Amino acid sequence: MKIGIVKETKNPPDKRVPLSPKQCSALLERFPQVKLVVQASDIRAFSDTEYQQEGIQIVEDVSDCDVLIGVKEVKKEFLLPNKTYFYFSHTIKEQPYNRDLLRVMLDKNIRMIDYETLTYPEKGRILGFGRYAGIVGAYNAFLALGIKLNSYKLKPANKCKDYKELKDELKKVNLPQDYKIIITGDGRVGKGAEEIIHALHITEVSPDKFVFDTFDKPVYTQLSVKDYNKRKDGNPFTKKEFYSFPELFESNFKQFSSQGDMYIACHYWDSEAPFIFSREDAKSPKFRLSLVADISCDIDGPVASTLRSSTIDEPLYGYNPDTESEVDFMDNNAIGVMAVDNLPCELPRDASEDFGNELLTKVLPSLIEEDTDTIIQRATICENGKLTSYFDYLQDYVDGKN
């Protein structure tokens, strides 16, 4: 088997890699029967020279590889026929903008294995950049607060050399004594955000204490879906019912938004689920939140202040709840918004190392040796010019019927 790491072709450029130079070296040491090359690139967080120093060959042409590995979608014109590809294809939710990408993969007889679909036999994703989305998103929240309060100034995450320097920057943070922070979501993203909260030595309190108690120090609470959703009919909340019949539920977030100052949104949201806070909710005199870091970044969705995604270069804008419109971040009537949708790109080396470790230890052995847990099989979207049985629901999407 010959594996090639492809140059990222999507714009804006993504500096992340699926495997770092040292991880490439470790792969070859563990699997001496495998050959591996890296396509030359001038945009990666790891330079071509760093790969060469690990004995990895840099090439321009990867057409003789069996398996091609990237991070973001490969442009249609660069897809090579009859190959196995690994990358985030952004097709499994029937994203309209990538319909043609999937069609081309089918036409070119490509075997597509999407990182997002790689799961353990008992469910649960194996790979993702969620941890670093949470880390950088929470860091950006405190960067934004320093600007809003004009009390301290953090270096932008993408200007930090690595995660260590980013954490060192946090020593500058100076929070008001009674500052209260809400996090929604307790998965990879939420846990990543908590790393920043813990580095700041902010005390965790239960959702009930957050709502009903007063504090003389900064505190945070982490909410799961049962905390900020409730049955419309007053019956007890069950998670299984919430995921199966979300229309029976409504938001229970007002009790938290009336007590919190900062909201860090790390949840996964389904379009059938209730909004967390609506535009009308944000107009209430009891609505206290003045800063929202929306890491989940569902546009015009469950977090009313997220009108658009922001960029790494310009991460902040303001939301005026009365006019329901975007205003300057520093406007006196604005809820400050951070809604960057590619946060892991701000710490590309660290995020890549984290991702590559999982890919190296938990996925590639199933590709190179025996796929005993059907990890690869269940993640294959298409092969031999057809959708696999796991993803045949995408046929209408491919045919343009929806």
Image (cartoon, rainbow, N blue to C red):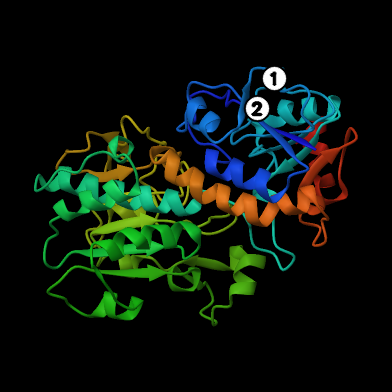
> In front: 136, or 303?
136
Whether label 2 touches label 1, CB < 8 Å: yes
Instruction: Give the farthest residue toward the left.
Output: 151
Residue at 63% x, 57% y is: 126
Count of residue discs: 2
Indicate the quadrant containing the C terminus: top left, top right, bottom left or bottom right: top right
Whether residue 240 is visible to the viewer of this picture, yes or no, is: yes
Q: Which of the numbered marks, if any, corresponds to residue 78?
A: 1
| Residue 151 in the image, given as x and y percentages of width and height | 9, 48
Q: Which of the numbered marks, if any, corresponds to residue 74?
A: 2
Indicate the quadrant containing the N terminus: top left, top right, bottom left or bottom right: top right
Instruction: Give the farthest residue toward the bottom.
Output: 236
Residue at 66% x, 57% y is: 362
Q: Is residue 326 left or right of residue 36?
A: left
Q: Provide the secondary structure element on which disc 2 rests.
A: loop
Q: Residues within 10 Å of mark 1 (few under 14, many from 20)?
A: few
